[in-house]
Amino acid sequence: MKIILGVSASVAAYKAAELARLLIAEGADVTSVMTPNATKLVDPRLFDAVTGRPTITDLFARESAFAHLETARGADAFAVAPATANVLAKLAAGIADDALTTVALAVECGRLVAPAMNPKMWDKAEVQRNVSTLRELGYVVVPPEEGTTACGDVGYGRLADVHVIAEDVLRLAYPGPGLTGRTVVVTAGPTREPFDAVRILTNPSSGLMGFEVARRAARRRADVILISAAPGHPTALGHAVRLRRVDTAAEMFEATAEAFEKADALVMAAAVSDYRFDEQRAHKIKKTKGKISTTLVPTVDILSEITKIKRDKLVVGFAAETDNLVENAKDKLLKKGADIIVGNVVGRADVGFGRADAEAVIVTGEGVEELGKISKAALAERVIDELERWWGGVR
Ligand code: CTP
């Protein structure tokens, strides 16, 4: 995967080195192109070192008269981060007066800009007009975030989180249609069933597995709806992932059923509580010396309910098991009516809930694939491979 990273003269220019590092960590070859002003803020040798390639700052300094074409050739994505108001204007107008803007016209791949500037500048009609023009030209725009900018002004203008930009760039650069045109619903995290105003029934799931599936589906060009009960935000998500937060199994069921109507697939990675309190008190129950007892009642089995209405849609479930992984995963495939069950070990210190790794098997109607110990990131890739294979007509 070849990515051209344009860097222009915003105070956030130094963050582009971290963006380059993130992209390289995902296997990309990154070539940096800097505007002359950007080189006054950050030394191009920083980008030489991070990318392992010479940074392009001046097309005329090269031996070849066609340096802009050579740089552009074979690129899978062209991303400008940070993009100043000046660069946005030039790109929108098709002006090519330096290496960055010339390469922008020479590439044949998808293009992206991540603007960064003072909030007063970002709010200007001419800047917004240029951003609209870039969108019309097919650019992906990663909007700036709200917050305090380097100059102390508050508003929209800060460069988006580089982890988020990286996700959007990787999606743009993905070679091949992947899951283009598919909508995938993913659930993640532990549901929380209230006992009273301050106490809950939950489990130690972090939500990492579901988040990994969501972001990797988005990288392969799916539109993703992530329904999360996770307490935090375990991975960065690009803009192709719509995040919906829920707490209880009932809320997750409602959100999942609604999202599934417009979806092509569901990946049910959430650790849904099987029980909830029969009675939920709105106040905090006061401490007493004696025992208290309460009644738990079953929650809705979301996966089983969704498979009843799945028609030709694809449904992937997970199975969290302490024993007999393969047998229990096979049972759940039949019992829950899913197309694929990803069985994974829980209750061990090195894998499962709250860990980066899983010990997993993939069970389909065709058989069992034992994956052994595998990172959740790699397992998520395997799950997406299964979706692609399913829709690719192999099954
Ligand atoms: N699941 C669900 N709704 C529930 C419980 C589980 O949709 N109320 C889903 C999980 O998201 C997972 C699959 O069902 O995709 C299997 O979950 P798991 O906890 O392994 O199994 P359970 O159905 O809870 O059965 P058991 O606790 O007996 O293993």
Image (spheres, rainbow, N blue to C red):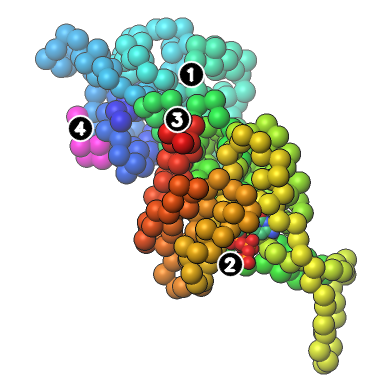
**Tag 4 or tag 1, which sits nearer the N-term?**
4
Q: Which residue is mark 3?
A: 392
**Residue 296 image point, x, y percent:** 79, 72
Which amino acid, mark 2? Answer: Pro
**Tag 2 or tag 3, which sits nearer the N-term?**
2
The numbered disc on residue 53 is 4
Is residue 284 in view? Answer: yes
Neighbor class of circle 4 (other Cα within 10 Å; few <14, some 14-19, many 20+) is some
Q: Secondary structure at mark 4?
A: loop
Residues 149 and 384: in front is 384
Place residue 19 in its image quadrant.
top left
Q: Residue at x 66, y 36 (%)?
A: 311
Stretch of the chain drawn in magenta: 49-54
Residue 214 in the figure: left or right of residue 45: right
Nearer the viewer's eye, disc 1 or disc 4? Answer: 1
In 3D space, how far apart are the residues under numbered discs 4 and 3 (Cα atoms)? Answer: 37 Å
Residues 263 and 226: in front is 263
In 3D space, how far apart are the residues under numbered discs 1 and 4 (Cα atoms)? Answer: 25 Å
Which amino acid, mark 3? Answer: Gly
Q: Which residue is mark 1?
A: 139
